[in-house]
Image (tube, rainbow, N blue to C red):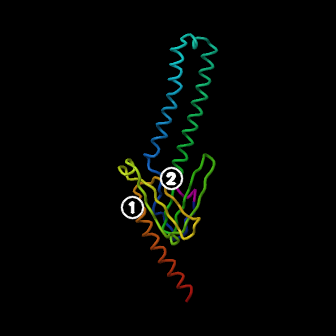
Amino acid sequence: MNVSHFLELKSYEHVQYILRRHWFTFIPKIILFLVLIALPLIVRAMIGSIYPELFNADVAFTLSVLLMSCYYLGILLFFYTQFIVFYLDMWVITNDRIVDIEQIGLFSRTISELDLFRIQDVTSDVHGFFATLLKYGVVTIKTASNNIHIVFKDVSHPDVIREQLIRLSHEDRKYHYTVAIADES
């Protein structure tokens, strides 16, 4: 995916990482989708076994098809929304800043950014059996300000990301301090 739709890079800036949530974290939503798909078929089979003549009537059959169609349309819309939120929720790390693109729904997105030289602390957390096995976790980035922090949720290799963010922030801090010193003299 081209990130130029979401942000405009500065002349000296280039993308280091584009991070998304780990694919495994979407599996529960897929399982829920499959259960919700099978649910009306199971209910219809149970009602058909208790009242075998119910669906032989034209009105009942037509009504059941209409209701199941509406239900499936709603389930598909729900799954599509969940996939869009999962896929478009991303974090872009450049050599100058971090851009947090948070997709909230189909028609709502929040984009925030943080300069790398402002980073005070980077923490990575891996909790759980599957997170440890598949190497995904949470990376929390804090600044000196109390209200500014960015959280990378369920990203692959959080320890590597943490180390790279620390390295990039040191490099950016050196650049900004040398520019500030050059401006003073």
**Residue 46 picture location, percent across and down:** 51, 19
User: Looking at the image, do the residues carrying marks 1 and 2 touch, with CB atoms under 8 Å apart?
Assistant: no
Which structural element holds mark 1? helix
**Which circle's residue, 1 or 2, is located before the other in the chain?**
2
Task: Judge by depth and name the residue closer to the eye, 97 or 10.
Answer: 97
Question: Considering only vertical position in the picture, is 185 above or below 79?
Answer: below
Which mark is in front, 1 or 2? Answer: 1
Q: Which residue is at 51% across, 80% downward? A: 177
Note whether 183 is above or below 150 in the view shown. below
Q: Is residue 51 magenta?
A: no
138 lies left or right of 149: left
Q: Label 2, secondary structure: give it.
A: loop
Cα distance in 3D space between marks 1 and 2 = 22 Å
The mark found on residue 4 in the picture is none
* Count of labels in the image: 2
Q: Which residues make up the magenta segment?
A: 1-6
Residue 17 screen position, x and y as percent: 46, 60
The structure residue drawn at horizontal position 57% and vertical position 14%, both measured from the top left corner, is 55
Kind of residue sitting beneath label 1: Val
Q: Looking at the rendering, which quadrant does residue 5 occupy?
A: bottom right
Q: Label 2 amino acid?
A: Met
Residue in the image at 63% along x and 48% along y: 107
Question: Is residue 5 one of those drawn in magenta?
Answer: yes
Residue at numbered disc 1:
160
- Give above or below for 123 relative to 56: below
- Residue beneath the point at 60% across and 47% down: 105
- x and y percentages locating residue 15 in the rendered image: 48, 63
Q: Mark 2 points at which residue?
A: 1
